[in-house]
Image: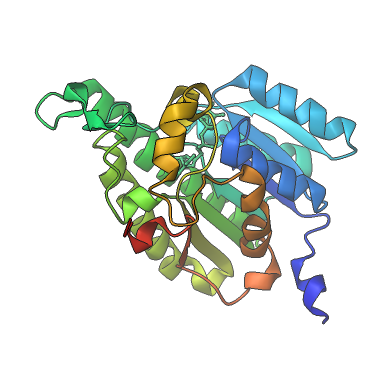
C-alpha cells in the first residue's frame, strides 16, 4: 500500500464531542474534508447545527446532536443517533472540555485570589471533574459500545492537555488532575481494547487560539502577547495546525500506535529559558 493511502478514511464515520468550536471543530473539519461522515455532538446545539450546516454546504455528510458529555444518558443518545444515521462508528474524538475557571495566576501576570487552592469554588471542582474526566470516560465508554457492537476496528482519540503533564497556573486547579486522569484512562483503555482492534490515544495540546476560557485570548491582545513570550515557538497555535495530527491518529496511518499521547505545544513542555 502506498503511504498516502494509509491516511484514507473515506466512507468511515466519526463522532466529535465539543465539535462546534475550537479544536473539536478542527477535528470535525479534518474528518469531513477527508471523506468521513461526521456527528458533531456539543452542548451548544445552535453552534453544532451551524457548523454541521456549513460543512454540509461544502458537500460533506455531517449531522449535529445536542449533548452534555457530563450526562451519560445524553452521551448514549448521541452515539445511538450516530449509529442510526451512519450504520456504525469507526472514529471518536472525546474532545469536549472546560478550562475550570480561574487559576492562581492571571494571564495579566499577577496572583488571582479566586484561583487559590483554599478559595476555589467547590462546585466548579465538581463540574470540572464531571466534564473533563467523567465526560471523557462516558464518551470512550459509548464509543467502545458502538465499535464492539459493530465488530469493527476503531480509533478513539481523547483531547487531554499539557496541563495533564505539567502545571498550568492560569487554569482552574481541577483541570490538572482531570486531564492527567484522561491520559491514564487512555492508556488503560488502550490495553483492554488492543485485541479487539480498537486503538485509543490522546492528544495533549498546548496553547491553541480557541474559545476556551470565554475566549480570553481573542479578547485580550496584550495578555496574549505577554503569554506568547513564554512559548518557545513564540506564538499560540491556529486550530488548523491540529488537523494533520487528527488524521494521522484517526486513520490506519497510526495502525501500530495505541496508548500513546502526542504533545502539540510549540515547545511549552521544554521550559522557558528567557
Ligand atoms: P472551545 O471552548 O473553543 O470548544 C469547546 C467546545 O466544547 C465548545 O463547542 C463547547 O460548547 C463544548 N462543550 C463544553 N462543555 C461541554 C459539555 N459538557 N458537553 C458537550 N460539549 C461541551 O475550547 P477548545 O480549546 O477547543 O477545547 C477543546 C478541548 O481541548 C478541551 O478538552 C480542552 O480542555 C482542550 N485543550 C485546549 C487547549 C487550548 O489551548 N485551547 C489546550 C489544551 C487542551
Seen from the viewer's position, the closer of residues 201 and 81 is 201
| Quarter of the image where one finds residue 8 | bottom right
Can residue 267 be seen? yes
Task: Write the residue at 82% across / 72% down.
Answer: 5
Seen from the viewer's position, the closer of residues 217 and 255 is 217
Q: How is the image coloured?
A: rainbow
Q: Position of residue 19 (x, y in %)?
A: 62, 35
Task: Write the residue at 34% across / 59% down.
Answer: 184
Can residue 71 be seen? no
Q: Position of residue 17 (x, y in %)?
A: 57, 38
Q: Is residue 28 above or below residue 272?
A: above
Quadrant containing the N terminus is bottom right
| Quarter of the image where one finds residue 90 | bottom right
Q: Position of residue 178 (x, y in %)?
A: 31, 44
Outermost residue, bottom direction?
A: 1
Q: Is residue 233 above or below residue 177?
A: below
Seen from the viewer's position, the closer of residues 176 and 213 is 213
Q: Is residue 31 above or below residue 134?
A: below
Seen from the viewer's position, the closer of residues 99 and 7 is 99
Q: Position of residue 234 (x, y in %)?
A: 49, 51
Outermost residue, front direction?
A: 274
Quadrant containing the C terminus is bottom left
User: Does residue 227 appear left or right of residue 73 in this picture?
Assistant: left
Task: Write the residue at 63% across / 56% down.
Answer: 246
Outermost residue, left direction?
A: 118
Please state the total of marks drawn on the protein image.
Answer: 0
Q: Is residue 191 above or below residue 54?
A: below
Task: Write the residue at 28% across / 45% down.
Answer: 176
Amino acid at each position: 500500500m502506498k503511504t498516502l493511502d494509509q491516511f484514507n478514511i473515506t466512507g468511515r464515520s466519526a463522532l466529535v464531542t465539543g465539535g462546534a468550536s475550537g479544536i473539536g471543530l478542527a477535528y470535525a473539519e479534518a474528518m469531513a474534508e477527508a471523506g468521513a461522515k461526521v456527528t458533531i455532538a456539543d452542548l451548544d446545539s445552535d453552534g453544532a447545527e451551524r457548523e454541521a450546516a456549513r460543512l454540509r454546504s461544502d458537500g460533506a455528510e455531517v449531522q449535529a446532536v445536542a449533548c452534555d458529555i457530563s450526562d451519560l444518558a445524553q452521551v448514549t443518545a448521541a452515539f445511538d443517533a450516530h449509529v442510526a444515521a451512519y450504520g456504525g462508528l469507526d472514529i471518536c474524538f472525546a474532545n469536549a472540555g472546560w478550562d475550570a475557571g480561574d487559576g492562581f495566576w492571571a494571564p495579566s501576570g499577577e496572583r488571582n485570589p479566586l484561583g487559590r487552592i483554599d478559595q476555589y469554588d467547590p462546585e466548579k471542582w465538581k463540574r470540572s471533574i464531571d466534564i473533563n474526566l467523567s465526560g471523557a470516560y462516558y464518551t470512550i465508554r459509548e464509543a467502545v459500545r458502538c465499535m464492539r457492537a459493530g465488530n469493527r476496528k476503531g480509533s478513539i482519540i481523547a483531547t487531554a492537555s499539557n496541563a495533564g503533564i505539567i502545571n498550568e497556573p492560569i487554569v482552574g486547579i481541577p483541570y490538572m488532575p482531570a486531564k492527567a486522569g484522561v491520559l491514564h484512562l487512555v492508556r488503560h483503555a488502550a490495553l483492554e481494547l488492543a485485541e479487539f482492534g480498537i486503538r485509543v490515544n490522546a492528544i495533549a495540546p498546548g496553547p491553541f487560539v480557541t474559545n476556551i476560557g470565554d475566549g480570553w485570548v481573542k479578547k485580550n491582545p496584550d495578555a496574549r502577547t505577554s503569554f506568547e513570550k513564554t512559548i518557545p515557538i513564540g506564538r499560540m497555535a491556529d486550530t488548523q495546525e491540529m488537523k494533520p495530527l487528527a488524521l494521522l491518529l484517526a486513520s490506519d496511518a497510526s495502525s501500530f500506535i495505541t496508548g500513546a499521547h502526542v504533545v502539540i505545544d510549540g515547545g511549552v513542555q521544554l521550559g522557558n529559558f528567557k
